[in-house]
Image: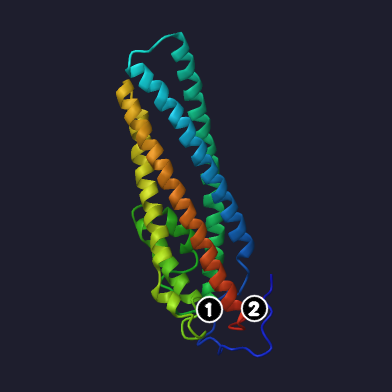
Amino acid sequence: MSYTPPLMPSAPPPPSAPGPGAWLKSPVGLANATVAVLGLGIAADVFSLWAGGGVFGVVSDVIDGDYGAVTEDRLDRADTLYGVSGILQGAAMLGAVVLFLCWFHRVRANADVFAPDGHRKTRGWAIGGWFVPIANLWIPRRIAVDIWDASSGNRWLPGAGQETKRRTLLNAWWTLWLTTGIFGQIASRQYRAAEEPEKVKQAVVSLMASDLVNIAAAIVAMLFVRRLTAMQDALARSGWGPRD
């Protein structure tokens, strides 16, 4: 998608040339696809909550001593549904990760046009930074901050620089992303290690709580993707900088 500048550009040209190979390209399509797959992830989490509730109910009956042929059949069905929900969650997560990384790299490349000198990491780190152990706890956020600041317009658009100071949405997205990753790992390990009914019941509660955090994280991620995409779209349409 090529951006059409207004007849009378309201912003001055960038202070320096963009990095090699950098040009504006609309992130809207990738943003829409990312948001759609995140929505599927939310649906998978809701299904997992329902399936987890079934396991919780059956295990509670077992703990209460109501264990017979009927309850055993219920347990098998509940366990199967829970397994299916895990597969759906994994598939949705994989799709969301792939699309998010494509979108993230796109907005990082655009940000190189908006602020060539405003980045602490090269474009390759927009993808590679997520896969570096330990360092992936802060590198992607640092890149996101640089993209956010570059896309806010800073002094080039009247009032747009306020977005640089208001990173509440970005910080909420990153905090929930870290929380859901850590919490999910703990809950999954707890469930895999559980053998006694009481332990299984506790693990299911942890997994259901993790699903709720996943839903919150996905909703905030959708808002973050929408906001940053809209910021870049508005800045590009202002007539600021080169276009493809």
- Image quadrant where one finds the C terminus: bottom right
Give the residue furthest to the top: 69
Image x and y of residue 141, in percent: 40, 63
Q: Is there any visible trace of residue 19 in the rendered image?
A: no
Please tell me which residue is depicted at 41% across the width and 21% down the height of the picture.
58
Q: In this view, does 218 lie to the left or right of 192?
A: right
Q: Where is residue 218 in the image (x, y as percent from the top left)?
A: 48, 51
Residue positioned 53% across, 56% down in the render: 100
* Rendered position, 220 above or below 84: below
**Which residue type carries mark 2?**
Arg
**Quadrant of the frame with the N terminus:** bottom right
Q: Residue at point 36% right, 50% down?
A: 179
Q: Nearer the viewer, residue 20 or 200?
A: 200
Up the image or down, 242 lies above or below 34; here it is below
Q: What SS does tag 1 mark?
A: helix
Label 1 packing within 10 angstroms: few (<14), some (14-19), many (20+): many
The type of colouring in the image is: rainbow
Image disc number at residue 22: none
x%, y% of residue 46? Answer: 50, 40
Whole-angstrom CA distance, mark 1 to mark 2, is: 11 Å
Residue 79, given in percent of the width and then of the height, sits at 47, 24
- Please state if 138 lies on the left or on the right of 27 as rendered: left
The residue identified by callout 2 is 243
Q: Do the residues labelled 1 and 2 touch (CB within 8 Å)?
A: no
Q: In this view, does 154 lie above or below 137?
A: below
Q: What residue type is labelled 1?
A: Phe
- Quadrant for residue 197, please give it: top left
Relative vertical location of residue 196 with respect to residue 4 in this rendering, above or below? above
Compare residues 187 and 101 and report the one nearer the observer: 187
Q: Which residue is disc 1 drawn over?
A: 114
Residue at image position (52%, 66%) is 227
Q: Quadrant of residue 18?
A: bottom right
